[in-house]
Image (spheres, grey):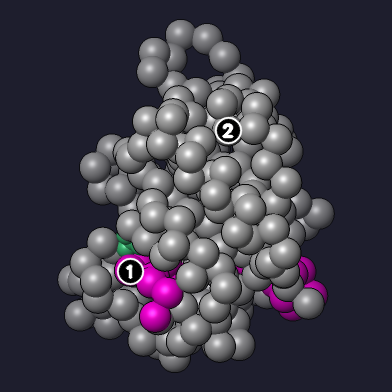
Amino acid sequence: MRTPIIAGNWKMNKIVGEALELCRQLDEAVANSDVEVVVCPPFTALASLNALGLKKVKLGAQNMYFEEQGAFTGEISASMLVDVGAEYVILGHSERREIFKEEDELINKKVLKALEANLKPVLCVGETLEQRKTGDTEKVVVEQTTKALVDVKSDELANVVIAYEPIWAIGTGETSDGQDANEVISSIRRTLAKLYNQELADQVRIQYGGSVKPDNIAEFMNQSDIDGALVGGASLNVKDFVGIIEY
Ligand code: 13P
């Protein structure tokens, strides 16, 4: 019922030439895949990638600001992203939360603006190692999800993708086990059912992220509530990313 979505978050990697080369190869390799494939390069590569006219691979951004335009030095608006072909935007990534001190209220404003501009947010939630150790995982992800979705309307919810990324599993080679990730993701879906209703909650795609590789993707995709992956390191290399998409 839910189309799986595999997205690559390149983070601060790749200049334009490298981005073009990777996406050309990727688009060809996954042309017949049943899953939705999204690449989120740095802002600087979006316009050139859009001009490639990719057939299968969709584009996303890694962040945006919630204001329409104006004196916000260094920021990028939702309509600027739409203008260069982005369909998705990652919001609330743990690196934004931790390094750039983004809080739930700001992330909520970004989610609302993205939806208004017809961009689909990939809302990231996840606990720190500390929070996991104290048994607070579910509480943290439920709270992050709830706060990010304030004022999101029922008819917009299905355009939101949620990525559960335990922070201790990002870039560390350590992964949550599939069943464990599925339980956290089920609790996110139960939260959506409470905030909206079960039917809407069942339409939302929820990804797992954190050290996803070709050799562990199946463990996650075999779970009932996991609808895809948000991939960092392994999305920087065509062979690995294709290996994940073809799980
Ligand atoms: P890694 O796949 O490199 O662990 O990164 C995950 C991530 O942060 C994707 O947003």
Residue 202, labelled with which disc?
Answer: none
Sequence-wise first label, 1 or 2: 2
SS at badge 1:
loop
Q: Are dots 1 and 2 in contact, CB under 8 Å?
A: no
Question: Which quarter of the rendering shows the N terminus?
Answer: bottom right
Residue 97 vertical placement versus 198 (above, below)? above
Residue nearest the viewer, comparing 9 with 34: 34
Residue at figure coordinates x 28%, y 38% from the top left: 100
Judging by the rendered image, the residue that carries numbered circle 2 is 49
Which region shows up in magenta?
Answer: 197-215
Q: Residue furthest top?
A: 71
Name which residue type carries label 2.
Answer: Leu
**Is 51 colored magenta in this rendering?**
no
Name which residue type carries label 1.
Answer: Ser
Residue at figure coordinates x 38%, y 18% from the top left: 74
Q: x, y (%) of residue 157? A: 71, 57
Label 1 CB sits under 8 Å from any ligand 1 atom: yes
Judging by the rendered image, the residue that carries numbered circle 1 is 211
